[in-house]
Image: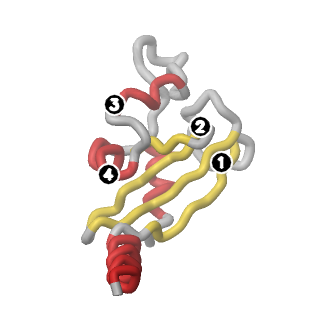
Amino acid sequence: MKKFWFGVIFVAVFVYMGMTSHNTVNKDDFKGKWPFSVEEVILSCYMQDDVKLPIVTIKGDRYGLTAYANNLHGSFDDINAINKFWIDDIKNKGLKVSLGDITNAALKLCD
């Protein structure tokens, strides 16, 4: 009986935290600004109630593309952990390439 309830709870939590979709994206095929030093990433989108949580997976580690997404699904507590893959914007000294295009691509996976 304990195994049954464990299974029910596990499925309920999985559905509640449900990943709606994921997509492997590479630099050459991506439509928009590529913000990473790696050639390929996996984009995912989770739903938490009515909130979309965009995630990027790089080399097996998950990084939230928003602070809330990182809190719930990121591999690291530090929102700045993604900085080791996030490239500088050569046109704007001191800034990084915008994550806007990659975040929007991940958010579309929740639709």
Q: CA distance from mark 3 to mark 4?
A: 12 Å
Return the mark for residue 30. 1
**Residue underneath mark 4:** 72
Q: Position of residue 52 (x, y in %)?
A: 34, 62
Q: Secondary structure at mark 4?
A: helix
Mark 3 vs 4, N-terminal side: 4
Q: Secondary structure at mark 1?
A: loop
Residue at the spot 29% in from the left edge and 65% down from the top edge: 48
**Residue underneath mark 2:** 34
In which quarter of the view is residue 107 placed?
A: bottom left
Q: CA distance from mark 2 to mark 3?
A: 22 Å
Foreground pick, 90 / 75:
75
Foreground pick, 102 / 21:
21
Crowdedness near tag 4: few (<14), some (14–19) or many (≥20) residues, C-alpha within 10 Å: some
In which quarter of the view is residue 75 placed?
A: top left
Crowdedness near tag 3: few (<14), some (14–19) or many (≥20) residues, C-alpha within 10 Å: few
User: Which kind of residue does numbered mark 1 sit on?
Assistant: Phe
